[in-house]
Image (tube, rainbow, N blue to C red):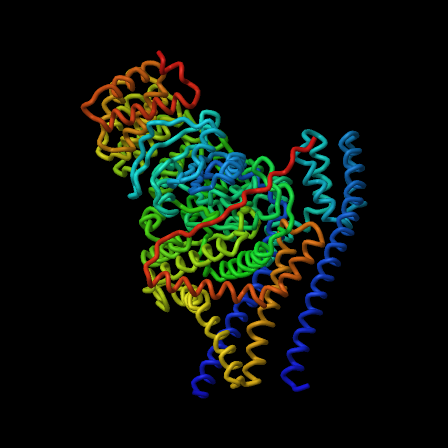
Amino acid sequence: MTTVLYIFSSIIMVYFFLLNSFYLFFIILSMFGLNRYKQINTFINYKDIFMMPLVKPISIIAPVYNEEKNAVESIKSLLSLEYPQYEVIVVNDGSTDQTLKKLIKAFDMKKTKWVFRKSVETKPVKSIYKSVTNPKLIVVDKLNGKKADAMNAGLNVSHYPLFCAIDGDSVLEKDALLKMVRPFLEEPEKTVAAGGIIRLSNGTKVKDGQITKINVPRNWLARFQILEYLRAFLGGRLGLSMLRSMLIVSGAFGLFRKDIVLKCGAYRAETIGEDMDLVVRMKKYLHEHKIPFRVGYIPDPICWTEAPETLRSLSNQRIRWHRGLIECLMHCKKMLFNPRYGITGLFAMPFYFIFEMIGPLIEVAGYTAFVTLVILGELNRTFALLFFLFAVVFGILLSILSVLLGEYSARKYPRLSNVFIITLFSLLENLAYRQFISIIRTKAFVDVMRGKQEWGIMDKKGFSVAKQQS
Amino acid sequence: MNTSLLIICYSLISLFFLSAGLFSFIILRRLTIQYRNIRFARKYKKIELDILNLVTFPHQELSSEIARRHQSHPKVLTKVLFDYIERIEGEGRDQLKKIFDYSIKIKCLKAIYSRRLVKRLQATHLFVVFSDPSETVHIMQLLNDKPLVRLVAVQALSRIQSPHAIAYIFQAFERDSIPNARTYINIMFTLRNKIEHHVQAYLKKPLSLEKLGMLIELVGAIPLRSLYEDIILLAQHADKEIRTKVARALGKMHISDAYDVLAQLSQDDSWIVRAQAVKSLGKLQDPRALDILTDALFSPFWHVRYNTGHSLAFMGLPGIKRLMAVAQQKKDLYASEMAVMVMDEIYYSGERDWIRL
């Protein structure tokens, strides 16, 4: 028994050490990446992109489901974007609240007899609305079929060769599309997708569809998530993209080449993690057909989205994300450790499999083993010490470093009190929040085994609208 | 106290100091940036005053004096010049260019050949606004650089517009790979009618299909109407992509003589060519096209029907009447649906009076 526990503890130690070392490596890479990006952007005038004749028009597809609190503000932000030619397609995925009514009222939408080419099968479309006041805006009203199905419905209606997937509750920076389209201009043949940084809108003020004031939210859960987002987007994803191993272009804001997406069969309607699933299948397709490609990443805060502020919503969100990750990796398991898929098969997929997918299981097992050993009075001091150093101290160090990453990002928190709060929360994050997240992510395995397909309830507060200044 | 507890205490204390250190670092960093910004702003104001003075009373010696006076602050000087050069025209602009030449140009030319991408990129960005024919050779070299630099080099070249640069661009277009060729097309577009003779010559050269297609698209995009005869010769090309591009270019060129060629292309074997030909026929607004377009609305291909519907709408009242007739017939519901949708679109784009008619 003692030998088994010893071997098990050693595996847990190695796991925590490797996981945190990888993240430390990504954060260091990201520091260089952020610095380089800043230097590269010196003297760039994004207005020049307007003058280029070969800039491709973009269809923005925003699926909404029960987003009555945020949808109007979000769509206002989409309609005020700076870009030469684009359309906004809002897909109402069978909302049961007032989302559709609010959109119709806010944008003077009228029902049309729109005829579209059904490139992808979707749940039936009930009607298509067009805005009388803003010709760029189209609203597709369809039966509920989850986000992937809604995205496919948007793809069917879209006109343009590039499409931008965006969450219906997100707010974009005015120049977000101009920044995102740059990889497509630099390497038009190779670039198949581009993603950017998502920041949390909790605590911020929104006016006319734009973020006007950045602040740290009052809610503790949202504060922890700020750190998570900083670490994930400025640390993890930027680092992974520098290693050409990024497997997720966030569903909250990503730009894709429509032809490649359609060739891959568009979004898989049955999946719950449609953003990762699409990128992995695109990479699979491109590797199999030996087409050189690039997935761009723009380390600028260009999209703001609302984080859940209740334990129930947060749990639902994280379980859903983890279910999506498991489903996606299992769907493409053929790619794991397969040299045919280049760095994606040999590094990215194994990394996501070992550290992201089964990571929570190992973490929870580690904590359980720790507590069991304490109860049995068998706790080895060396194990306890190493566990504390690798799991907690190393974790806190990474959280602290993510605060520094936030400081280097373009739209940092303006007040020092904000930085102080985030630093404080970086110390607290690894003492309860991280363990809680690991436990709820473990539940995703149970849901996958049970074949659960529900999306989960999300309580949204809506954006704080800035007061009109006289 | 045992060693393990001691290590734990030490690590916690270290973490505390690390956080405190990080917080102090952030405060110090912000203060330093703030201080630098104040200094930058102060210097900026001084240089700005000098430059406004120079622009008001342009003087050869004054520009060299300003360049000499401020060349020890190249970043601020560059920023001021960068901010003002786009806003000022005429002699004042030339004076700013002179300051750049005296103080920063040599550093920029060196930086173009730097091994560091960031340096090359920043220098090339400056040549986008401070471009001069004498730098063509240097900037052309950057077209073989990384895509990021290439894109900026293209912008810089498009501002130069000397005959020498144009000849260079076409040679490079012929020689280089396809992704680069797209970049050259971007430059050529900005040069507009200055490239007419070159395009005419290159349309006759044995180029790859992709490059030939790009040139045809370019003729339509600018548009170069004098090359009409050269374009219609390609309407019989064996490749359907080339025929499609010819149809598109003819639509953009707005030459009424193109009707016959487009009518012929609207009966092409490939539906892609047909879809483009009907679109271009609509743009010509020739009443002779009404029958062809009405027939095309019954095509089994969605894209052909879609383009035809919009072409009929584009032709004004006679086209709308045809759309209404197709909308009312019950034989082909696909055609009827498309006609209704197009009329709906016209309604929502504010042209509702047409519908009532």
Determine which quarter of the picture holds residue B208: top left
Quadrant (top left, top right, bottom left, bottom right) of the C terminus of chain A:
top right
Q: Residue at x 41, y 23 (%)?
A: B348
Q: Is residue A390 above or below residue B30?
A: below
Q: Residue at x 18, y 23 (%)?
A: B331
Residue occupying the far front of the picture = A375
Left or right: residue B307 versus residue B11 is left
Q: Is residue B298 above or below residue A334?
A: above
Left or right: residue B133 versus residue B296 is right
Residue A404, position as x, y percentages in the image: 64, 60
Residue B244, position as x, y percentages in the image: 31, 34
Please say whether residue B156 is visible from this viewpoint.
no
Residue B43, position as x, y percentages in the image: 79, 45
Left or right: residue A21 versus residue B34 is left
Determine which quarter of the picture holds residue A381: bottom right
Q: Residue at x 50, y 53 (%)?
A: A297
Left or right: residue A390 versus residue B301 is right
